[in-house]
Amino acid sequence: MSAISSKSTQKVQQALEKLELSYRVVELPASTRTAIEAAQAIGCQVAQIVKSLVFRGKQTNKGILVLASGINRVDETRLAQYCGEPIAKADAEFVLSKTGFAIGGVPPLAHATIMETYIDQDLYQWEKIWAAAGTPHAVFSLHPADLELITSGKIVEIK
C-alpha cells in the first residue's frame, strides 16, 4: 500500500478530512475495480467490499447511488420501489457526469452531484468495510455506521 498520488484519490481524502474522519486512502498495486479483485488485493472477505453502483431514474434522470455488499446483487425492482420510479443501469458517461469518477473507482462520497443514496444493510454485520477511493487501485477502510454520515443514505434491504 502506498500514499495517494492521483487527483481523484486526493479529492476523496480531502472529503474525508472535511468530515473530520481519520480514514486514510491507500493506493494498491493490484486492481480493486471489482469486488473480487478488491478483496483479493486487500485480503478481506468479498462481503466487506462496498460496491458503489449508480442507477438512473427513468422519469427524472436523477442519479441513484447504491452502496452494496460485494457479494450482493441489487434487486432492481425493490430499488425502483424505494425510488418511486422505474430505474435503469447507468452507462459510463452518466456515472462520470453524476459522480465525477469513472466506473471501477467510484467512492461513496465526494461526488459531482448529490444523489439519492441507499446503503445495503448487510454491510453492517462487519466491523470494517472497504470502499473505492477514486481510482481502480485506491481504497479506504471505514466502519459501516460512517456510511450514513458520509452519504446521508438510507439503510435498506437491497438484495
Image: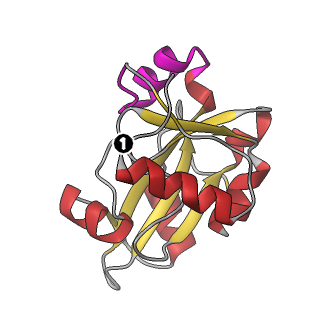
- Residue 17 figure quarter: bottom right
Residue 9: x and y, percent?
44, 48
Q: Which residue shows up at 67% across the image and 70% down it?
A: 152
Residue of label 1: 135
Badge 1 amino acid: Thr
Compared with residue 97, is residue 101 higher up or lower down, i.e. above or below? above
Q: Nearer the viewer, residue 82 or 123?
A: 123
The residue stretch that appears in magenta: 30-45
Whether residue 65 sits left or right of residue 101 in the image: it is: right
Quadrant where the image shows the C terminus = top right
Q: Which residue shows up at 48% across the image and 15% down it?
A: 40
Whether residue 50 sits left or right of residue 85 in the image: it is: right
Q: Is residue 22 magenta?
A: no
Q: Which of 74 and 62 is in front in this view?
A: 62
- Residue 63 figure quarter: bottom left
Residue 10: x and y, percent?
46, 52
- Residue 18 figure quarter: bottom right
